[in-house]
Image (tube, rainbow, N blue to C red):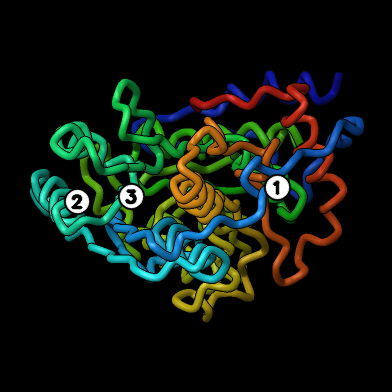
Amino acid sequence: MLLTGAMALAGCAKDAGGGGTSAGGGSGPCKLNPPPAAAPAPTSSTTQQLPPPDASAMRVGVAFDIGGRGDASFNDASVAGLDRAKAEMGLRETKELDAGAGEPEDAKQTRLRQLAREGFTPVIAVGYAYADALKIVAPEFPGTKFAIIDEQIDGMPNVTSLVFAEEQGSFLAGVVAAHKSKNCHVGFVGGVQTPLIQKFQAGFEAGAKAAAPDITIEQKYLTPAGDFSGFQDPNKGSEVATGQLEAGADVVYHAAGASGKGVFGAVKGAGAQAIGVDSDQYHQPTVAEYKDVIISSMLKRIDLAVYDYIAGVARNDLSTVPEKFDVSIDGVTYSTSGGKIDDLKPTLDAYKAAIAAGQIQVPEKP
C-alpha cells in the first residue's frame, strides 16, 4: 500500500518550461518506504545465453552522435559493445565517423551513405538524431543492414531499432538518490528537452517518490528540443547543476551526455553527490577527476545492444535481438563501482525485480 501511494505521488512532479521543483521534504534525511516484496529475478538477453559467433569477416560502420568517442556516456557505451565484439567474436574491421556541432541535417545522410558505399554492413547509427536521415538512406542501400539506437523505425526491412526502457533504469537512480540524500532534496539535469530525455526525468522522479514520497526534486533542461548543444556544453551543465545545489539538492542525476562533466564538477565543488548515466561513469577516464562524487550510474546497456545486434547479424538471425532492452534482461540497470551504494543493493534489486515482474509500472512522461 505504501508503494502504491508513492507511485501515485510520482506523477505530481511538474515541468515548468524546462525547469522546476516538486516540493516535499528538504529538512533532514528522507522518511523512506520499505522496498517491495521479493519478485522473480531478471533474466539475461537471449544472445548472452548463446556462444559468440564468428564475426571476423564483418565490416561494421558506426555513425556517432554529437560528442563522439570519449564523451564518457552515450557514444562510449556503443564503443564498449564494439570492443567486446572484437574481443569475443573476432570482429576486425570497423570505421567510426563523428557528428559535428551545429551541422546541417544532410551531414547525417552523408555519413550513413559513406559507410554504406564503402561496403560496411551493418551500419550502426548512434542516436535518435539519425532517424530522419536513416529513413532516406536505408532504402537507397537495400543490401546494407542498418541499426539505430534510441529510435523505433518500423516498416523498413533492413533497419533494426535498438531501444531501451530508460525510465526503468532511471527509477532505480531515483531510489538511490532518495536513500543517499541527507536533506531529502535531489536534482535532475536533462541535456535536451525531448520525449526521450523526459523518460529519464519521469523514471527518476517516480523512483525517488516511490522510495520517499515527501522528497523535493529539482529539474531543468540545458536546451529546448531541436538544440542538441545541450549534450555537449559542460559549462551550462555546471551552471544548471549549481543552481539546483544552491536550492538545496545534494544528489544530482544527469542525462546530458558530455555536459555531464560540468554537472560532476559543480557537484564536487559543492561537496555533494552525483549519479551518472549510460556508461559506468565512475570508470570513465574523461571524468576520472570526479569519480569520488559519482555514487552510481544508471547503466543503459548500449554496449549490450550493439554486441547483441552484431552477433545477430553474424548469425544471420536478428530474431535474437530483444525488442526492448529493459530491466528484465539487464538492458537497463545500476552500477555499484566505488562501493558507495553497496548497502542499497538488496533494496534496488527488490525494486528492479518488481519492475521486471510488472508489479511496478514506471511512467515514460513526467
Residue on which the image places disc 2? 116
Residue 92 or residue 301, whichever sits in front: 92
Q: Position of residue 123 (x, y in %)?
A: 30, 50
Does residue 178 appear in the picture of this structure?
A: yes
Amino acid type shown at disc 1? Gln
Q: Is disc 1 in contact with disc 3, using a CB cutoff of under 8 Å? A: no
Q: Position of residue 203 (x, y in %)?
A: 58, 35
Residue on which the image places disc 1? 49
Residue 70 or residue 207, whichever sits in front: 70
Element at label 2:
helix
> Left of 179 or right of it: where is 87?
left
Residue at image position (35%, 65%) is 234
The answer to which of marks 1 and 2 sits earlier in the sequence is 1
Query: Image quadrant of residue 359?
Result: top right
Amino acid type shown at disc 2? Ala
Residue 21 or residue 73, whichever sits in front: 73
Local crowd size for mark 3, using a 10 Å CA cut-off: few (<14), some (14–19), many (≥20): many
Q: Is disc 1 in contact with disc 2, using a CB cutoff of under 8 Å? A: no
| Mark identifier at residue 122 | 3
Element at label 3:
loop
Amino acid type shown at disc 3? Pro
Residue at image position (59%, 39%) is 204
Q: CA distance from mark 1 to mark 3?
A: 22 Å
Residue at image position (83%, 38%) is 41
Local crowd size for mark 1, using a 10 Å CA cut-off: few (<14), some (14–19), many (≥20): few
Element at label 1:
helix
| Mark identifier at residue 123 | none
